[in-house]
Image (tube, grey):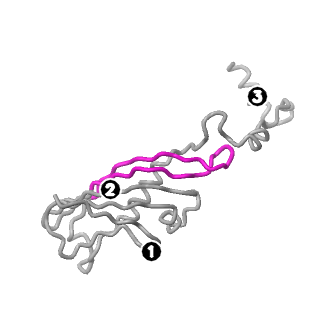
Amino acid sequence: MQPLKSVYWKMGDNLVIQLNGLPDGKMDFHWDLGKEFFASFGNSDILEARVGVDARLRKSGDCMEFDVDLDGTVTVPCDRCLAPLEVEIGDTFNVSVKLGELPEDAEVYDLSQDVYDYTCLAIPLRRVHSEGECDPEVVKHLGGNKEPVSGDSPFALLGDLLGKLK
């Protein structure tokens, strides 16, 4: 196995593997991604990011297989109070490519879209601070309307149903 090749992502870079002259065997790659990577995809929900990407490439003839590990944190707005919330992420995915499936003039394989998609999928759907950690100024306005729903409201029937379930 060849030694780890470390690549640090910066604006304008991609997670690119050069295909020309790539020998058969195994190679390891590493990229460190920040918020600029996600902003380059137009994602404004990710306020900050520190995501490490480790890719292990196995090449045999015209077949390549990537095993990719994602590990780190992203900061997103809390769904409840909109304050920044740091979320740990981790995921693993595989990509298999046969060189005949790529255009003949392809000199590189770009993992950027795959890494972006799997990182976004690793972020929980419900992103909220632990109980008591939300911004107290916002939370005091989240109490909602505690007044009973009048009988003329279409929601009155729902209130009656909820009352019967308790």
Secondary structure beneath dot 3 equals: helix
At label 3, which amino acid type do we have? Gly
Residue 82, compared with residue 14, is above or below; it is: above
Q: Residues within 10 Å of mark 3 (few under 14, many from 20)?
A: some
Residue 86 x, y percent position in the rendering: 55, 47
**Magenta span has 91?**
yes
Q: Which residue is mark 1?
A: 12
Q: Quadrant of the C terminus?
A: top right
Q: CA distance from mark 3 to mark 2?
A: 52 Å
Judged by its main secondary structure, the magenta piece is strand
**Horizontal placement of 40 versus 93: left or right?**
right
Q: Earlier in the sequence, mark 2 or mark 1?
A: 1
Highlighted range, magenta: 67-95
Q: Residues within 10 Å of mark 1 (few under 14, many from 20)?
A: few
Secondary structure beneath dot 2 equals: strand
Q: Earlier in the sequence, mark 3 or mark 2?
A: 2
**Horizontal placement of 152 versus 10: left or right?**
right
Q: CA distance from mark 3 to mark 1?
A: 54 Å
Residue located at (41% from left, 72% from top): 13
Q: Which residue is mark 2?
A: 54
Secondary structure beneath dot 1 equals: loop
> Which of the labelled discs sits on residue 159, or is there none?
3
Locate residue 60: give its quadrant: bottom left
Residue 154 x, y percent position in the rendering: 79, 37
At label 2, which amino acid type do we have? Asp
Nearest the eye: 68 or 148: 68
Residue 53 x, y percent position in the rendering: 36, 57
Q: Earlier in the sequence, mark 3 or mark 1?
A: 1
Residue 54, compared with residue 80, is above or below; it is: below
